[in-house]
Amino acid sequence: MTAHFVDLSWRLKSKIITFCKMEPPYTGHDWAQNFFALLLDWGIDRKIFSITLDNASVNEVLQKILREQLSLQNSLICNGDYFHVRCSEHVLNIIVQEGLRVASDALHKIRESIKYVRGSEARKNTFKECVIQVRSIDTKVGLRMDVATRWNSTYLMLESAIRYRRAFASLTIRDRNYIHYPSNDEWKRAEKM
């Protein structure tokens, strides 16, 4: 749990006030009880303006119960209208992931191409030879693999793969087992993304 607050000099401060292990299976009700107990321990149960959580169903239950508990104390500002603030990073990731579905075929082929090259030392060496053969590829940035749930890593993966597009084309000629080469339209979609 991290608390964000303004100090007496009007400076924004952030403090990690606890790490809490929850033994599975747990529910939103369990989280709410622990959360409220922590607020009481810290003496900040009457100083909460809002909480920021992602969209997990357990968090939805947590915030509803916690809001009810804090409302009973009459300690919520603006009657709790701004109590639950959804995590903007999580919301942005959901929006971008939805947008990326439009180009899922291109993404899949690029992701599989990188996995294929990185899958064995022999393929890495063959790919290096392809890079040398096609020339003028800036290799300072290697092939990056994304984490599918992190949109910014997908962007970085595409950015790196596009640099190596001609090397992947060369790989299709040299390696008959390489089957995931994106079409020209798929590369164009990747560039637009």
Image (cartoon, rainbow, N blue to C red):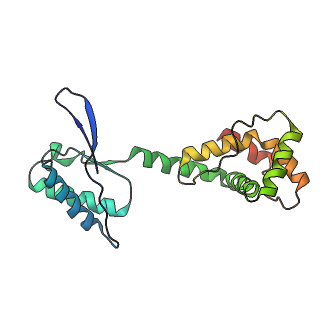
Image: 8 above or below 122: above
Q: Identify which residue is drawn at 47% across, 45% down.
A: 92
- Quadrant for residue 164, please give it: top right
Give the position of the C terminus as an image quadrant: top right
Pinpoint residue 166: horizontal percent, then vertical percent: 83, 42
Q: Residue furthest bottom?
A: 25
Image: 185 above or below 69: above
Q: Is residue 188 left or right of residue 152?
A: right
Pinpoint residue 16: horizontal percent, then vertical percent: 29, 46
Pinpoint residue 28: horizontal percent, then vertical percent: 29, 65
Q: Is residue 128 left or right of residue 2?
A: right
Q: Closer to the camera, 64 or 52?
A: 52
Count of numbered badges drawn on the protein: 0
Q: Identify which residue is drawn at 34% across, 73% down.
A: 25
Q: Residue furthest top?
A: 9
Image: 67 above or below 193: below
Q: Is residue 146 left or right of residue 93?
A: right
Q: Identify which residue is drawn at 77% across, 56% down.
A: 121
Q: Identify which residue is drawn at 24% across, 48% down.
A: 83
Q: Residue furthest left?
A: 73
Pinpoint residue 156: horizontal percent, then vertical percent: 62, 42
- Quadrant for residue 187, please give it: top right
Q: Closer to the camera, 162 or 92?
A: 162
